[in-house]
Amino acid sequence: MTKKIEKKIEIEEVKDLYYIPRSLNALERSELMKLLPTEGSYPLLRSVREKREQTAWSDEEYKKIVKKPGDFYFDDRGTKLQVQAGTFAYNFGAVPEVAIDLGEVITDIVIKGLTDLEKTGKLKDAQFTLYEKYVLCDKKT
């Protein structure tokens, strides 16, 4: 009987680690929102809306991330760049990572979405770190 209790505790500990908040950068937060459903039951959509609001960039973050023509910014290597006319640039490193707690239901949706993209060979480079943080997390802990 002791072994069963020990096993149950181990499973609960893994489950707790599986659904912990993840620190996501601005690009990861943007890509995460693309994985959330846009249709479903009312309770699901209500939960999704709350998570979108939690995940979305604030006005302050938007101003730091999105660079307009003529703006100067520093890239990841510290090189000063100027945005050319007719284009926009995104400086995702301009804001710190934010801990995002999606909860169990939305985390499962995100994991399924990332897993499906990987299985079909459609996982994008921008989603690579999300895949590591959500799908491979249990293998690292």
Image: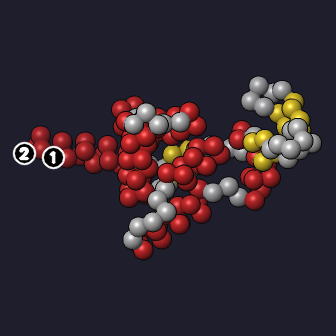
**Of the numbered discs in the image, which one, if any, rests on residue 5?**
1
| Label 1, label 2: how far apart the Cα atoms are | 7 Å
Q: Quadrant of residue 6?
A: top left
- CB under 8 Å between callouts 1 and 2? yes
Element carrying mark 2: loop
Q: Amino acid at mark 2?
A: Met
Residue at 41% of width from left, 67% of height from top? Answer: 40
Q: Is residue 53 left or right of residue 109?
A: right
| One can see residue 129 in this view | no
Q: Is residue 99 above or below residue 44?
A: above
**Of the numbered discs in the image, which one, if any, rests on residue 86?**
none
Residue 15 location in percent, x, y? 32, 47
Q: Is residue 56 above or below residue 7?
A: below
> Around disc 2, counting alpha carbons within 10 Å, would you say few (fewer than 14), some (14 to 19), or many (20 or more)?
few
Q: Is residue 84 left or right of residue 62?
A: right
**Of the numbered discs in the image, which one, if any, rests on residue 1?**
2
Q: Residue extending furthest left?
A: 1
Camera-side residue of 58 and 112? 112
Residue at 78% of width from left, 31% of height from top? Answer: 75
